[in-house]
Amino acid sequence: MLGWLMGAAGVGALVSALSLAVRKSVVGLTRMLQVSTAVLGGGLILLGLSHTLWLSLLWMMLVGFGMLQAASVSNTINQSLVPEDKRARAMSYYTTAFFGSAPFGSLLGGTLADRIGAPHTVMITGAFCIAGSLWFTFELPKMRAVMRPIYQQMGLLPVYAVALAPSVQ
């Protein structure tokens, strides 16, 4: 059964990768980060509530989609904002934070699952993802104010687009 669940997550991740591959620009990725994190959280909550294999497979596809989309989009946004000569340094910090925090999260998740059960732990994790998505939504205007001039300088965002639609990013 674990193989089926992991395969379903892989299908969701593949769909996510294909959806990112057809994008032409980084403009609009902040919205995708909001959505993908919420999809990840919702999928985890629904997975924790599920007691049927076919529903769990569906929820795992959402989880796989949201996880790959959020990780890839956040990395792409980071790399698009960093100057060329500092990109390797920024990538090393991102990788260290991403992979370095995973063991601590696994330890916390395992401890919590031992105390309250795996389904409840998965649902709590999903709730934190949704909370993170909401936090990101409220912080996004400040981030866009910083991102906009960088994208304009790179030629990714036309100057006239800012006057017409300030939330284009």
Image (cartoon, rainbow, N blue to C red):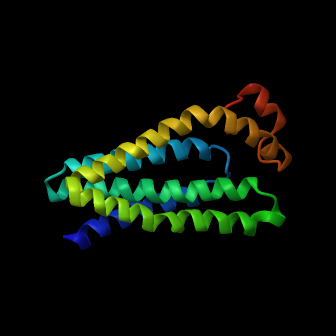
Q: Is residue 54 above or below residue 124?
A: below
| Numbered circles on residues, count | 0
Is residue 74 found left or right of 56 in the rendered image? right
Quadrant for the N terminus, please: bottom left
Q: Is residue 82 above or below residue 91?
A: above
**Which residue ends up furthest to the top in the rendered image?**
164
Is residue 126 found left or right of 139 in the rendered image? left
For the residue pair 28 and 63, the one nearer the viewer reads as: 63
Is residue 76 found left or right of 128 in the rendered image? right
Residue 168 sits in which quadrant?
A: top right
Picture residue at 70% right of the left edge, 59% below the top: 79
Q: Is residue 69 above or below residue 5?
A: above
**Which residue ends up furthest to the left in the rendered image?**
51
Picture residue at 43% right of the left edge, 59% below the top: 15
* Residue 132 seen from this side: yes
Q: Is residue 50 above or below residue 1?
A: above
Is residue 141 found left or right of 160 in the rendered image? left
Picture residue at 20% right of the left edge, 47% below the top: 49
Quadrant for the C terminus, please: top right
* Residue 43 seen from this side: no
Q: Position of residue 2 (x, y in %)?
A: 23, 70
Q: Position of residue 122 (x, y in %)?
A: 29, 53
Picture residue at 76% right of the left edge, 57% below the top: 82
Q: Position of residue 114 (x, y in %)?
A: 22, 61
Residue 138 sits in which quadrant?
A: top right
